[in-house]
Amino acid sequence: MTISELESLIHSSGKDIYSFCEQLTRSRIEAEELYQDIFLQAVQKLDKIDIDNNPKSYLLSIAVMLWKNKKRKRAWRARIAPEECLTEEKQEEFSEETTPEGYVIKAQEVQILKDELKMLSDKYQIPLVLYYMEEQSVTEIAKVMKLPKGTVKSRLYKARIILKERLIQRGFKAE
């Protein structure tokens, strides 16, 4: 892959990759940092990126690897010297609802779903985000996570069951 091909990949898939970074990090600032790190790593590994073999999946796998490394380092540091966590207030964007009540209900439902998604371990959360938000196939997720397809399928299945049970406990109807 050449630099110009990487630039066109950034233009075509950059928003999806950034969105995935936001889902992983749950923070705009950390997402921006991870996003930059992905492309720095991509520039270093230009010779390994095959433009004909779904380069977006390769970049997503870099994102997963970098995020796992960062979380591992953060956990190690927290064990050595705990630090106070700063939270970032986020403005949520929603499509226009016909009534103010509908807007509030939709906002609450989305927040509840996000909260429950955050409670899942990475082994369930990452495949769900890749599948539903990044619209990756099971095969692509398997490549990104370096797992067999059957494992990805079972994690998606298990994650759906866990989310469904938690949402029912919070008063949502089972569909």
Image: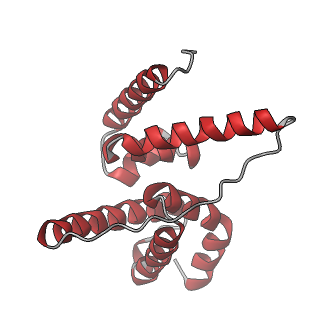
- Residue 155 position, x and y percent, is 35, 34
How does the figure colour the protein chain or chains?
secondary structure
- Residue 144 position, x and y percent, is 40, 54
Q: Tell me which residue sits at (35%, 68%) in the image.
A: 66
Q: Tell me which residue sits at (48%, 67%) in the image.
A: 50
Of all residues, the one furthest to the left in this rendering is 80
Quarter of the image where the C terminus is located: top right
Nearest the camera: 20 or 108?
Answer: 108
Nearest the camera: 60 or 85?
Answer: 85
Q: Tell me which residue sits at (31%, 51%) in the image.
A: 146
Task: Classify residue 128 as left or right of residue 106.
Answer: left
Of all residues, the one furthest to the top in this rendering is 174
Look at the picture and state if 91 lies above or below 130.
below
- Residue 97 position, x and y percent, is 82, 38
- Residue 173 position, x and y percent, is 57, 16
Look at the picture and state if 62 lies above or below 154.
below
Task: Classify residue 152 as left or right of residue 97.
Answer: left
**Residue 99 can be seen, yes or no:** yes
Q: Tell me which residue sits at (44%, 38%) in the image.
A: 116
Look at the picture and state if 53 lies above or below 164.
below
The quadrant holding residue 49 is bottom left
**Residue 53 can be seen, yes or no:** no
Please count the marks in the image.
Answer: 0
The quadrant holding residue 14 is bottom right
Of all residues, the one furthest to the right in this rendering is 98
